[in-house]
Image (spheres, rainbow, N blue to C red):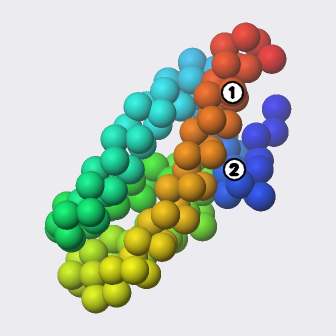
Amino acid sequence: MPHVFPEHDLDLTFLFEIADGSDEFIVESIDMFLQQTPDLLNTITSAIGSNDWTLAAQASHKLKPNLGFFGMPQSQANIQEVELMAKAGAPDPDLLLSKFNDVKGVINGNLDRLVKIKADIEAGL
């Protein structure tokens, strides 16, 4: 069951490989991503809004490996740039916000896709 959506920066090949046929592992992994990711996005959004660059960098750093695990390499690269810009005190806050909004848009679309993929797996499709 291929779950590769390059047009959406989503490739679940790695997840399916390490699951080694365990639908339970896939569902649990997707559940964790669905629970943690919106919280991290909200933390970054709030941190950027209050110019708390340390918190923005920390939350971006936490989000980064999850994006790699779920095959979102472009979003992972962009959130790394956000992290590095935040660590530097956001010398160009507009660029930081633009990069983050790109990541957020892709992730939000993929959250919906992951909900559907999880439901399909649970239904045995």
124 over 94 or under it: above or below? above
Q: Which mark is residue 116?
A: 1
Q: Residues within 10 Å of mark 2 (few under 14, many from 20)?
A: many
Left or right of 83? Residue 19 is: right
- The image quarter containing residue 95 is bottom left
- The image quarter containing residue 54 is bottom left
Q: Nearer the viewer, residue 14 or 121?
A: 121
79 over 3 or under it: above or below? below
Residue 78 in the image: x percent, y percent?
Answer: 50, 71
- The image quarter containing residue 57 is bottom left
Residue type highlighted by circle 2? Asp
Residue 9 in the image: x percent, y percent?
Answer: 67, 57
Residue 38 in the image: x percent, y percent?
Answer: 41, 41
Q: How far apart in space, not on screen, are marks 2 and 1 (Cα)?
A: 15 Å
Residue 19 in the image: x percent, y percent?
Answer: 60, 31
Residue at position x 76%, y 57% in the image: 6
* Residue 58 visible from this viewpoint: no
Q: Which mark is residue 11?
A: 2
Residue at position x 49%, y 63% in the image: 101
Q: Nearer the viewer, residue 52 or 36?
A: 52
Of tags 2 and 1, the one toward the viewer is 1
Q: Residues within 10 Å of mark 1 (few under 14, many from 20)?
A: few
N-term mark: 2 or 1: 2
Q: Which mark is residue 15?
A: none
* Residue 24 visible from this viewpoint: yes
